[in-house]
Image (cartoon, rainbow, N blue to C red):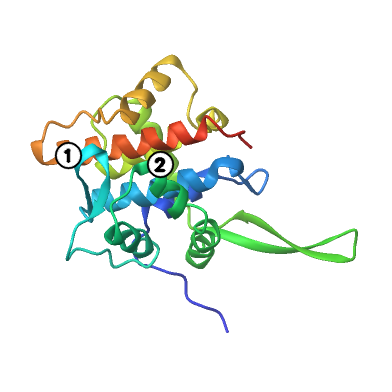
Amino acid sequence: MTTAPRTDPSTLVEDLLLLLFQPRSGTIAGENTLFYVLGGAVLADLTLGEHVTTEARGRIRSVAGNPPSDDLLRPAWDYLFAKPRGAQTALAAIGPPLREPVLDRLIARGDIDQEPRKTLGLFRTTALREGETGRRAGLLADVRRALSEGGPPPARIAALAALLSASGTLPQFHREIPWTSSVITRAKELERGDWGADAAAQAVTRTMTATVVNSVIAAVVVLPRG
């Protein structure tokens, strides 16, 4: 029996893992520090949805009565509802379990396919390849515009581009996103929350997202990248 592909809106962490997937090799860029990056995407998504906020000393806490409906995001909200945490502590707790369920989501959506293979003609393995939805190409185009055209991107795309930059893998995308001085400068601006938006209502979101992104950077730089 074939399961129908998922059609519900994707989370930011799904979009980020899909971007990090490398179709040429069937691997995921930045595996050694992936859990910090995925944890950052979950925190950023909670921030964009106003499910979390910050209190004194920058600790992140859940907004009572506003849990996320998505079960990829809910465990992080529950964790921060029990006790406010610093971003670094939250990343280390939230990130490690995410890779498998997020990848399962992408496979269920048809964005990534699993391909059975045999090694040495004997051992069965599973390789990953890009699906036929075209969603990865669309996300890449959105991020490329955010990094190269200079206009104010949508908040979600700004956060996605900032997280991709924070992961340290952006140079690997030079075929799709030219690795130029202007792109590097814009990426750093997005990391800092300079999205080019003036609305006061977005100021807190930009600041909180920048805090999360820079916590990811701080975590990534102390670990070897793969």
| Of the pair 133 and 23, the residue shown nearer to us | 23
Identify whether 119 is placed above or below 17: below
Mark 2, secondary structure of its residue:
helix
Mark 1 = which residue? 204
| Of the pair 130 and 73, the residue shown nearer to us | 73
Residue found at x 17% / y 66%:
65
State which mark lies toward you, 1 or 2.
Answer: 2
- Indicate left or right for 60 with 173 as reference: left
Q: Position of residue 195 (x, y in %)?
A: 25, 31
Total count of labels = 2
Q: Amino acid at mark 1?
A: Val
| Of the pair 164 and 91, the residue shown nearer to us | 91
Mark 2 = which residue? 88
Residue found at x 39% / y 17%:
182
Image quarter (top left, top right, bottom left or bottom right) of the N terminus: bottom right
Q: Earlier in the sequence, mark 1 or mark 2?
A: 2
Q: Position of residue 68 (x, y in %)?
A: 27, 63
Mark 1, secondary structure of its residue:
helix
Residue lying farthest to the top in this orientation: 181
Residue lying farthest to the left in this orientation: 200
- Indicate left or right for 137 with 125 as reference: left
Residue found at x 60% / y 44%:
31
From this viewpoint, is residue 146 visible? yes
What label sits on residue 153 in the rendered view? none
Q: Amino acid at mark 2?
A: Gln
